[in-house]
Image (cartoon, grey):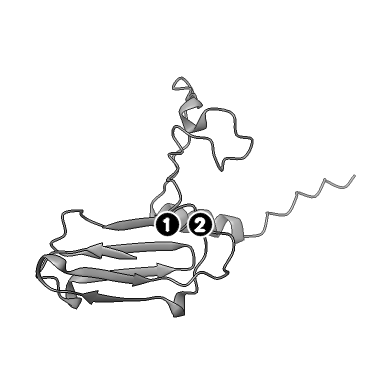
């Protein structure tokens, strides 16, 4: 795959991050910022077999990416999967069909517990959890 880059692009201007199912390409000075390519790949690649080089000069300068798929089949319909907007799309959510997170209703009338605490409060809670329960009082003997 080739990506046109500015004529002055040097190897130090290029950042390529390849994971098994993810690709990010950033090029300093490129019109597309912050990333030229960023997203989940349509399939999986052999990370150690992937490489990139700069080719050409002037207006013909390109970044050449070589990605080796884990398996020859199936063919990828495109390089990247479509991004999922979980606020609008319920794809990937258990149960689905609820219109994604946009369908959630928040009841503002109920008091909620804070989800954060200070370090001191957390340490106190930890100590309370670790300390054994006090013994039950013994009934008076008759």
Residue at the (29%, 65%) spot, across then down: 2
Q: What is the secondary structure assignment of the residue under circle 1?
A: loop
Where in the figure is residue 10, as x and y percent of width and height?
Answer: 15, 75
- 102 with respect to 56 (left or right): right
Residue at the (57%, 55%) spot, across then down: 128
**Label 2 neighbourhood size at 10 Å, few (<14), some (14-19), many (20+)?**
some
Residue 114: name its quadrant. Answer: top left
The residue labelled by disc 2 is: 76
The quadrant the N terminus occupies is bottom left
Foreground pick, 72 / 22: 72
- How far apart marks 2 and 1 lie (CA) works out to 7 Å
Residue 110, numbered label: none
Where in the figure is residue 121, as x and y percent of width and height?
Answer: 43, 52
- 21 with respect to 33 (left or right): right
Residue at the (42%, 54%) spot, across then down: 80
**Label 1 neighbourhood size at 10 Å, few (<14), some (14-19), many (20+)?**
some
Residue 67: name its quadrant. Answer: bottom left
Where in the figure is residue 75, as x and y percent of width and height?
Answer: 54, 59
Foreground pick, 5 / 142: 5
Residue most extreme to the top: 109
Foreground pick, 109 / 74: 74
Is 27 above or below relative to 106? Answer: below
The residue labelled by disc 1 is: 79
Q: Are marks 2 and 1 in contact (CB under 8 Å)?
A: yes
Q: What is the secondary structure assignment of the residue under circle 2?
A: loop
Where in the figure is residue 18, as x and y percent of width and height?
Answer: 40, 69
Residue at the (21%, 68%) spot, across then down: 62
């Amino acid at each position: 795959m080739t990506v046109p880059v500015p004529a002055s692009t040097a190897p130090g201007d290029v950042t390529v991050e390849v994971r098994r199912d993810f690709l990010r390409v950033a090029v300093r000075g490129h019109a597309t910022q912050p990333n030229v390519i960023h997203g989940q790949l349509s399939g999986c690649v052999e990370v150690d077999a992937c490489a990139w080089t700069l080719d050409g000069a002037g207006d013909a300068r390109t970044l050449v990416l070589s990605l080796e798929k884990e398996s020859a089949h199936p063919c990828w319909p495109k390089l990247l999967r479509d991004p999922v907007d979980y606020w609008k799309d319920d794809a990937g959510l258990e149960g689905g069909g609820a219109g994604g997170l946009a369908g959630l209703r928040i009841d503002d009338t109920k008091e909620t517990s804070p989800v954060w605490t200070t370090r001191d409060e957390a340490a106190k809670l930890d100590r309370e959890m670790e300390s054994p329960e006090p013994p039950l009082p013994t009934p008076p003997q008759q």
